[in-house]
Image (cartoon, rainbow, N blue to C red):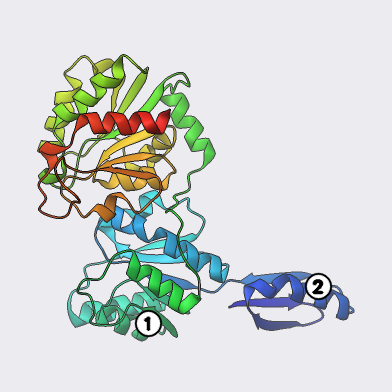
Amino acid sequence: MVFLMFNVKSSFRIDIEAAYIPLILLILKIYIKKPISKVYILLVKILAIQNKMGIGDTVIYLPFIKGISRKFKSPVSLLTKKSSKAQEFLNQTTYIDQVIYQKKNDGILGSIKLAGELNTYNFEKVFIFNSSLRFNLISRLAGIKKIYQYPLFKKKNQHIISAAKKLIKDNLGIDVNENPEIQINKNLIREASEKLNIKPDEINILLAIGGSGPTKRIPAKTFLEFMKKIKNMKKCRFFLATGKDEGEQKILNEILNTEFKDQCVALDNYPINKILPLIKNCNIAVCNDTSFAHLSSALGIKTITLMADSPLIYGSYSTNMFPIIPDGEQTVSHDSLGKDKINPDKIFNKFMSIIS
């Protein structure tokens, strides 16, 4: 619902669905004798709650948040954990109004404090992407009238994509089947290209070689074998994305201390908001199951996902994702422990099929 307020001789207010705004304006133009001097469109204030920890978790929910935004013709605010780093990669995405970080609000007093904070925003609707009674009660205490949520107390075996699809379909009547989308200012993309001397005659490849845990980190030798296979076929430049963990740095240094050193740009000292425009300049990405796999695919980059030790859905939910699983496996999940069985030949073949 949106509110239209008109300044004619005196002001008056009409509550209508956003889709009817053009029709209402036409009727008013015909039947109101005096000119309408101002039209104020006050969009409905909507909150989405996603309380999983990671960057990838937040990216996965973006199509559903965008669907909500499209339905109500209004950007959506997002409540999430600081560990999601959502403020760093969603600050230019137009269907996101603002990102609110959830503080450590443990216990009853913490919940009351969070409810009080949310109350100051005057949200009218909330979409809760979990089955938590806590967030349901917080939303009520915050004075939010319309609460849409997964069934309470039914967290067990809840599919991360299917549950979100059902919430939106059942309550808004829309099917969400699109890829996540992160928006970046074109000037920032151009500036990144100029700063790093991106050349159109080279294939610029994002290699996300890190990972949140050691079982997700494919060995350096696997990446190096892949790099050797394309060396004589394509003129390439490699952008190495990883974190500061000791294990991640070891993999980074193993790659940098090779014949490919001059073709590599290490991104471990870049903040996320600086890496995103650079990723947008890449032709393709090859990523462990790490935040950069989610970010690159949401930026529209074809992304080969190396799924060694995570449920396959995390590397296949977007049509921009092309998963590789360990040799000898039919699928992959937690505890697959397959990082040493990711085949560089399969990475190369998938790479060639995408860029050809």
Q: Give coordinates of residue 173: x percent, y percent.
A: 50, 75
Front disc: 1 or 2: 2
Local secondary structure at mark 2: helix
Quadrant holding the N terminus = bottom right
Identify residue for label 2: 26
Q: Nearer the viewer, residue 350 or 138?
A: 350
Q: Residue 47 lies in what quarter of the image?
A: bottom left
Which labelled disc corresponds to residue 310? none
State left or right for residue 79 relative to residue 73.
Answer: left
Give left or right: position of 9 versus 292.
Answer: right
Q: Position of residue 116 (x, y in %)?
A: 34, 79
Give the residue type at disc 2: Leu
Observer able to see residue 41: yes
Q: Amino acid at mark 1?
A: Ala
Position of residue 183 in the picture relative to residue 156 (left or right): right
Q: Is residue 267 shown above or below 78?
A: above
Residue at 33% over, 79% down: 115
Residue identifier under label 1: 142
CA neighbours of label 2 inside 10 A, class few (<14), some (14 to 19), many (20+): few
Please tell me which residue is depicted at 36% across the width and 49% down the height of the picture: 88
Q: Which of the two discs, 1 and 2, labels the residue nearer the N terminus?
A: 2
Q: Residue at x 44, y 32 (%)?
A: 281
Quadrant location, the C terminus: top left
Q: CA distance from mark 1 to mark 2?
A: 37 Å
Residue at the image point whose x is 38% and y is 32% from the top: 353
**Picture coordinates of residue 230, whole percent (x, y):** 30, 20
Q: Estimate the x, y position of residue 16 in percent, counting from the top left.
A: 65, 80
Quick one: 70 or 141, which is closer to the camera?
Answer: 70
Q: Nearer the viewer, residue 258 or 123?
A: 258
Q: Residues within 10 Å of mark 1 (few under 14, many from 20)?
A: many
Q: Secondary structure at mark 1?
A: loop
